[in-house]
Amino acid sequence: MRLRLKPTPIFFMHVPKTGGTAIGQWLKSVYLAQDFIHLGVPEIANLPAASLAHYRCYHSGAHFGYSMLHMTQRGDLAVCTVLREPIERCVSSYYQLRRALLRNPHAFRPDYVAHMLDHLTEDIADVDREFLSEILTTQTTILGARRDYVGFFEELRRRRAIHGRSVFLRPHVVAHVPDTEDPQQTFERAVAWLRSMPVVGLTERFEETLQLIADLIGVPPPRQPLTANVNPSRNDLHQTYRAAIAPDMLAHLEAINHYDLALYEIACDLFGQQWARFCNG
């Protein structure tokens, strides 16, 4: 463990439903308040553009990926992320979205809430397959997409002057950079970004992942287990969603996540190499 007087500047690429909320809360406790920023839509919209480069810990939420890192204009940031077995994450994301719409509908556009709750069934096994394919965002897309955040926030600030805080209602649609939507190229960009990261963690190896991140930034790992945003209906966190899914639905989810399944294999290999270096160092 390499302890430092001041934690290393870091960009934590939070892929939703991988344990990133808990990691973000821990990082917030590690860095000074003025050094930490959660990169959410309201936070960035309320921040002068020139101030974005003045932090030491960036917790990238709301599916913000590589283009958001580029927007910080910081070449000195150590980047890390956590990936999860794709089927587990896919199902978890589905139930998380349904819970959010039921418990906090005022955070979303009313038309979106009405449309989604017409289709989101209590059991994922009963949902329309085509609809499911449309609403799920893969880890490959989050890591490999290139989006026009500069244009998005310029337009958001303009609309806020007219419509007020209603512009912050989810979901937020951020346009792709032109000519960057080819799925194979998105996958290749995601792989390249993973390979450049000093820490690629795994939800399934969460405690070891925390040790790698702690070593990267030069602080002790958390003393207590980290949990946040866990499905309240799951009594046994060791039980997998995959084991309870019917074969035909499982085949459909694997088809949706075919790039993610390949990306996860690469992430597992990278994690294994990084963990071995840590243990032998």
Image (cartoon, rainbow, N blue to C red):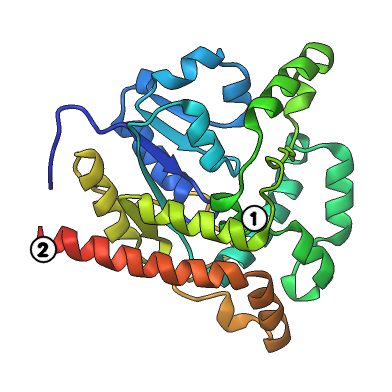
Q: Is residue 1 visible?
A: yes
Give the residue pinned by disc 1: 96
* Residue 279: % across, % down: 14, 62
Counting labels gives 2
Give the residue pinned by disc 2: 280
Residue farthest along the front direction in this orientation: 179
Foreground of the two, 43 or 144: 144
| Mark sitting on residue 159 | none
What residue do we see at 20% from left, 27% from top? 6
Instruction: Residue 276: name its quadrant.
Output: bottom left
Marks 1 and 2: CB-CB under 8 Å? no
Q: Is residue 121 visible?
A: no
What residue do we see at 73% from left, 37% from top? 172
Q: Secondary structure at mark 1?
A: helix
Figure quadrant of the C terminus: bottom left
For label 2, the crowd category at 10 Å Cα-Cα, with few meaning under 14, some 14 to 19 and many 20 or more, is few
* Residue 82: % across, % down: 42, 55
What residue do we see at 54% from left, 72% from top? 261
What residue do we see at 81% from left, 72% from top? 129
Vertical side of 107 occupied by 85: above or below: below
Vertical side of 33 occupied by 195: above or below: below
Q: Secondary structure at mark 2?
A: helix
